[in-house]
Image: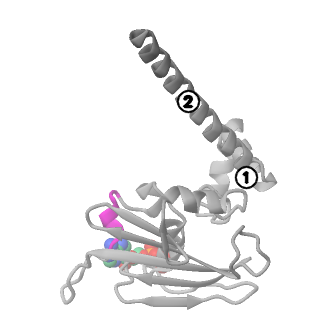
Amino acid sequence: MFLKRLEIIGFKSFADKVVLNFEKGITAIVGPNGSGKSNISDAVRLVLGEQSIKSLRGNKLEDVIFVGTDKRKPLSFAEVNLTLDNSDHTLPLDFTEVVITRKIFRSGESEFYINKTQCRLKDVYELFMDTGIGRDGYSIIGQGKIDEILVSRPEDRRQIFEEASGISKYKYKKEEALKKLIATNENINRINDILCEIQ
Ligand code: ATP
């Protein structure tokens, strides 16, 4: 699996549609200070479901939508499409290409799509679990991240190893199953209460 294409519309400094095609191997993005290099990795974080606006270097979601200039009106939404080559089927989908889309609106709402089909953030999160790419993955190492890992608590550092070794998906599924079990037990208790009242 590799990143094939990134399409950015209305996100931060990219008012017009910008398309970046990536080849296999190493790609370096260079440019003067403030030209938008970090905005590109922010766009990748956004589409992968980043919920912390601080991580996207903003205070609220609308800060990352093109804010406008003297000559240009602000935009009402931003969209990022990330295309992955999935010919090795690393992602458990029957597609050789997977496109993840996130649209964000000034109201603070977000929409997610997998191959143009609207889905939940949870679906994107689960799709990338244990691949190292997702929101909590280690594929984007920003400035200061290495220091952060080195000084983090052992429990937090462990999460990185769990993601890399492919067990975080199972931990997540266990937590989900436990939540369902608790909800089911609560429902049983409620039914028993009703039965006692009727009898
Ligand atoms: P450096 O090399 O200094 O790290 P960089 O190339 O990584 O810089 P970025 O931090 O990606 O640059 O981009 C900063 C630019 O993005 C600034 O000019 C800023 O005004 C612009 N920018 C950020 N948010 C928005 C927004 N919502 N609308 C328009 N422009 C924005």
Numbered-mark total:
2
Of labels 2 and 1, the one closer to you: 2
Q: Earlier in the sequence, mark 2 or mark 1?
A: 1
Q: Provide the secondary structure element on which disc 1 rests.
A: helix
For this view, does 78 lie left or right of residue 186?
left
Place of residue 43 in the rendered image (x, y in percent of width and height, measured from the top left): 49, 73
* Residue 99: numbered disc: none
The residue beneath circle 1 is: 163
Q: Is residue 176 above or below residue 144?
A: above
- The crowd level at tag 1 (other Cα within 10 Å; few <14, some 14-19, many 20+) is many
Query: Which residue is painted at 32% across and 58% down in the image?
Result: 60
Instruction: Judge whether residue 186 can be spotted in this image.
Output: yes
Is the Cβ of the residue at disc 2 closer than 8 Å to that at disc 1? no
- Residue 95, quarter of the rendered image: bottom right
- Work out which quarter of the rendered image holds the C terminus and state it: top left
* Residue 184: numbered disc: 2
Query: Which residue is painted at 77% across and 55% down in the image?
Result: 164
Instruction: State the CA–CA distance, disc 2 to disc 1.
Output: 29 Å
Residue range in magenta is: 59-65
Residue type at the position of mark 2: Thr
- Residue 152, quarter of the rendered image: top right
Compare residues 184 and 100 and report the one nearer the observer: 184
Compare residues 94 and 143 and report the one nearer the observer: 94
Query: Which residue is painted at 56% across and 60% down in the image?
Result: 123
Place of residue 61 in the rendered image (x, y in percent of width and height, measured from the top left): 34, 61
- The crowd level at tag 2 (other Cα within 10 Å; few <14, some 14-19, many 20+) is few
| Ligand 1: quadrant of the figure | bottom left
Compare residues 126 and 47 and report the one nearer the observer: 126
- Work out which quarter of the rendered image holds the N terminus and state it: bottom right
Is-magenta flag for residue 63?
A: yes
Place of residue 172 in the rendered image (x, y in percent of width and height, measured from the top left): 66, 44
Residue type at the position of mark 1: Glu
